[in-house]
Image (tube, rainbow, N blue to C red):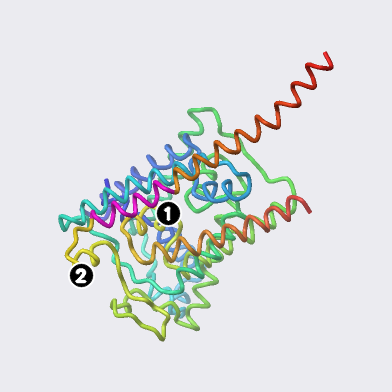
Amino acid sequence: MSVVGECLTAFIFGSMVGFLVQRSRFCNTAALRDAMLFKTYRNTKALLVTMMILTIGFTTFMTFGDGKPLHFYVGLNQVIGLFLFGIGMVLAGACTVSTWVKAGEGNVGAIWALLFTFIGMFLFSLVWSFIYWPPAGATMNGVPNVAGLQFGFANASTLQEETGIPAVFFGLIQTGVLYAIYRAILRKERRIEEQRSAARQPATSSVEAAV
Amino acid sequence: MFLVVGAWTVGGGETMMTGLIAQFILGDELARIPFWDLVFKPDAGYWKIYISLGMLFGALVGAILSKEFYWRVPRHLSEWVMITIGGLLMGVGIRLAFVCNVSTFFGLTPQMNLGGYLSVVGIIAGAWVGSMIYKKVLEG
């Protein structure tokens, strides 16, 4: 594909995602924050279902050697970076996707958050230029680099290569784990619902008694 | 479809935009900051930029069609402060981790990438701390 074609495809794909996210009010931030803060799990369940479907999909592709996984070298920087990101996204009230979506809805706060995300990235680029950590993509060669706190690279494809067990097998295990979490959430929801109705019961009966 | 979603990371597009904006303001001076030379060379033809712009556009269309479009402005100073700090932390965090939460949940973890698990640990811990701060600010 030519560059213009790529960009156009990306734009159309992005528009679709933006439209769907706007309509469904789906948000990764909300998925985590609401579960922790408000004990509502609507988005968390959606997130889990999406992850289950994607896990099966990706690992099936990988089993047949297709599927082009992200070739991605990981290290301690992921944990620290996403820790900061996690704090940031709750404070800003949106992750990167929903910031764009909210900006499209006319939320000035989201535009402000985006502006400061850009500034944060630029600031980090300055910091990076001093410390050169995490190592740049070009210098990552997949070999665990303990000095750089990098752990190399592993995913379902490499698991398949090393153990000879099809990737989809590991995918099914992961899906099972995700499904267990999903079930736990459903149970929790039911318990909260029961508590609420239990709390409501005496209130209504006392009202009836008063009447 | 899986291929597109799998390659979908959000941070890259924003970083490229940052680079382009910085290049626009600083001009050739930007080449003196190694990050923009070694990791992200500003390039307007980078396709991920257009995913982000597309999301903006798609959300705009969706909001207008459902008559949900109106300007929302945060009222309290505390909200502005939280958004500012949150935005900065997101920017720093994305670049430090090289991933963002979309690629964590929809890209890396379904591919059973080791980075996905590390990221999930980080983001859940971060969201928890963030929620605590958020609660404090709301109550205090």
Outermost residue, top side:
A211
Quarter of the picture holding the C terminus of chain B: bottom right
- The residue where tag 1 is placed is B102
Chain of residue at mark 2:
A
User: What label does residue A146 carry, if any?
Assistant: none
Chain of residue at mark 1:
B
Q: Nearer the viewer, residue A28 or A37?
A: A37
Q: Secondary structure at mark 1?
A: helix
User: What residue is drawn where x is 57% and y is 57%?
Assistant: B127
Q: Is residue A190 above or below residue A162?
A: above
Span shown in magenta: A168-180
Quarter of the picture holding the N terminus of chain B: top left
Q: Measured from the top left, where is residue B133 in percent x and y?
A: 68, 58
| Amino acid type for the residue under numbered disc 2 | Glu
Q: Measured from the top left, where is residue A32 in percent x and y?
A: 53, 51
| Amino acid type for the residue under numbered disc 1 | Val
Q: Is residue B132 left or right of residue A180?
A: right
